[in-house]
Amino acid sequence: MSYDIAINKAWEAVLVLHPPRALNIKFLADEYALDCVDKKVLSSACNVPAKDFTAILILHYLAQKLKGLPPVSGEWADFRELSGIEGYGPAFRARSIDPILKKYGTHPQGLVSALTRLPGKQTKEGDVGILLEAFVGVPVLVTLWQGDEEFGPDANMLFDRSISKIFCTEDTVVLAQIIAHQL
């Protein structure tokens, strides 16, 4: 699938805001160097171009950052509570929650080991919870519950309500998927 149109639109949204020629954006465990003249997004860790869907997400974040990020509200929202989600629920679950359950469902404490690779901290949410800083000003809470005789394990990913002022619903699904696969 070609992301050319989406990437070009994302660059247009950034360039109209007159960013510096070069800047860095921290995203999860990596930092990305953005060249606003040559329109490149490179992983600083390995000096390779970011995957297209990652570059689009970074550019959307940067455009909002240049306009001014909304303050973190401190209120958590389940994906279903975010506006405009009709039709995205099954995709969200399949792309973000199911991979977490597959990896950590039988050993929830293993989720904490992700903090050796990703910026965040352990929380008291769920049986096991971690709070990640996806981007500066974009916290994401991942929770796991152990299964028992009656119910299987379950997981959730919660977002600060301010995320809807930074990303569209599709971007939030992509962000959740990237987080789930980096856990």
Image (tube, rainbow, N blue to C red):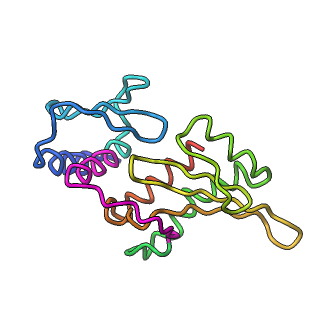
- Where does the image place residue 61, in percent across and percent down from the top left? 31, 50
Residue 135 in picture, x, y percent from top left: 40, 47
Q: Is residue 143 left or right of residue 161?
A: right
Q: Left of 40 or right of it: where is 126? A: right
In the displayed structure, 21 sits above or below 7; it is above
Q: Residue at x 38, y 30 (%)?
A: 43
Decide whether residue 163 is among the magenta residues: no
Q: Residue at x 70, y 64 (%)?
A: 154
Between 132 and 173, the residue placed more toward the observer is 132
Magenta-colored stretch includes residue 71: yes
Q: Position of residue 22 (x, y in %)?
A: 20, 30
Question: What residue is at 15 percent from the left and 31 percent from the top?
Answer: 21
Q: Is residue 144 left or right of residue 97?
A: right
The image quadrant that residue 39 belongs to is top left
Task: Identify the image quadrant of the C terminus.
Answer: top right
The residue segment tinted magenta is 56-79
Q: Position of residue 127 (x, y in %)?
A: 74, 60
Rendered residue at 56%/42% (across/down): 182
Considering only vertical position in the picture, is 55 above or below 80?
Answer: above
**Of 14 and 50, the residue lying toward us:** 14
Q: Residue furthest right?
A: 149
